[in-house]
Image: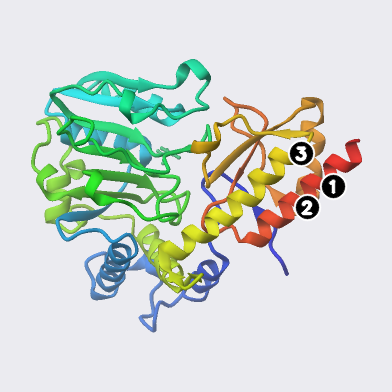
């Protein structure tokens, strides 16, 4: 039986191989007599799952030795508070506003520091990326926040800003929730990265944080111990019970990622090639059509989240109903933007995007 193609923005599709592997191990993980959800997080079985997941992710994302990988809880929105609690020292925080998620981040950060909006694309309805050369960075910021893939608006940074070259000594903190592991990360430009797992790594409930050593140990006194990066790092993410199931599924996803090959590349580099091809297919079709439109500037269109509109919005419900009947699920746009959105994360195969484009072409033809 073929499963439908699921274009959900998150929680999102998980690679079928991973789901099947997890299903086969549900009742008995590797002869232990226990399912992963039933294991002590301090037992040797789970420790081996955790250690492999950490090592595989470090390899996949080429995380340097002076960065810690933390498996936490609280989601992306939790990190909007946890990051300033750990990094702000009560001082100035520069935020680059590029869409709904960075907007939420700056609002939350105001509780813990003095937020300065270094740049914003609000005036053009979040459809462009403010050029880093024009950012108004503070001389004394504790960190600079950016959301490197705006899931709702469909905007992605295709190059990370080099803050040093822009005259700032502050570390860059990125929310990479919705494009983590879809492309390599230039860690020389990043002090901290966080992301919820439910877009591109696994189930909801796991939050990934990658943080440079020198940023540990500066938490405000009010920071809960379970969210103090130094404490979490010192306990190898086991200060309190970690989201064991999430770590396990993410671990299987990392192994799946390591098996990917494309154009002689492997892992995340291979995944990136496939993501570029998927996004190009969909954007080229939208741009060439009379019915569909994407409003985001070409140079910052997201490879992961493709919002689009029907020029005749009275056809929206018919479009969605026909898509569902064709086995193309969860294409409705976010309520704040409207229209449609196709999220084409790592787990979406090229065949899924081909099926979507085929349906869109046929729908347009029957409307003419
Ligand atoms: C989904 C998402 C979040 C929110 O994550 P939660 O787990 O719901 O807190 C934050 N930032 C980005 C970019 C997202 O895509």
For discs 1 and 3, the disc positioned in front in the rendered view = 3
Spot occupied by residue 179 in the image (x, y as percentages of width and height): 44, 48
Residue 362 image label: 1
Task: For marks 1 and 3, give the CA distance.
Answer: 11 Å
**Where residue 189 sits in the image (x, y, percent)?**
25, 44
| Residue 312 against residue 179 in the figure, above or below | above
Left/right placement of residue 208 relative to residue 171 reads right
Quarter of the rendering occupied by the C terminus:
top right
Q: Which residue is mark 2?
A: 358
Quadrant in the picture for residue 169: top left
Label 2 packing within 10 angstroms: few (<14), some (14-19), many (20+): few
Name, please, the residue furthest toward the bottom.
Answer: 31
Q: Which numbered disc covers residue 289? A: 3
Asked if labels 1 and 2 touch by Cβ distance under 8 angstroms, the answer is yes
Which sits earlier in the primary sequence, circle 1 or circle 3? Answer: 3
Question: Is disc 1 placed on a helix, strand or loop?
Answer: helix
Labels 3, 2: front one: 3
> Is 290 drawn above or below residue 177 in the view shown?
above
């Amino acid at each position: 039986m073929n499963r439908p193609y699921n274009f959900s923005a998150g929680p999102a599709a998980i690679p079928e191989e991973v789901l099947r592997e997890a299903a086969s191990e549900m009742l008995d993980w590797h002869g232990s007599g226990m399912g992963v959800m039933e294991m002590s997080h301090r037992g040797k079985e789970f420790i081996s799952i955790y250690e492999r997941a950490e090592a595989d992710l470090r390899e996949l994302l080429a995380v340097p030795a002076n960065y810690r990988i933390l498996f936490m809880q609280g989601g992306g929105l939790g990190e909007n508070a946890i990051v300033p609690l750990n990094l702000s020292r009560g001082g100035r925080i520069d935020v680059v506003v590029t869409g709904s998620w960075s907007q939420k981040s700056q609002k939350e950060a105001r509780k813990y520091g003095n937020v300065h909006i270094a740049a914003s694309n609000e005036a053009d309805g979040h459809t462009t990326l403010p050029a880093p050369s024009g950012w108004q960075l503070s001389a004394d910021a504790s960190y600079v926040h950016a959301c490197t893939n705006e899931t709702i608006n469909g905007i992605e940074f295709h190059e990370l800003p080099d803050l040093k070259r822009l005259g700032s000594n502050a570390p860059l903190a990125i929310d990479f929730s919705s494009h983590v592991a879809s492309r390599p990360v230039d860690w020389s430009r990043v002090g901290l990265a966080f992301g919820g797992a439910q877009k591109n790594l696994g189930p909801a409930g796991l939050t990934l944080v990658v943080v440079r050593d020198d940023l540990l140990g500066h938490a405000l006194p009010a920071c809960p111990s379970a969210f103090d990066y130094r404490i979490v790092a010192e306990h190898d993410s086991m200060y309190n019970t970690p989201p064991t199931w999430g770590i396990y599924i993410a671990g299987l996803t990392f192994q799946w990622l390591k098996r990917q090959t494309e154009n002689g590349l492997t892992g995340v580099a291979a995944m990136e090639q496939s993501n570029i091809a998927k996004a190009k297919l969909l954007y080229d079709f939208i741009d060439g059509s009379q019915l569909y439109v994407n409003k985001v500037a070409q140079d910052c269109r997201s490879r992961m989240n493709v919002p689009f509109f029907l020029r005749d919005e009275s056809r929206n419900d018919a479009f969605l109903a026909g898509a569902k009947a064709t086995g193309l699920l969860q294409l409705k746009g976010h309520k704040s933007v409207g229209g449609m959105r196709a999220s084409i994360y790592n787990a979406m195969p090229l065949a899924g995007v081909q099926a979507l484009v085929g349906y869109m072409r046929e729908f347009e033809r029957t409307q003419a």
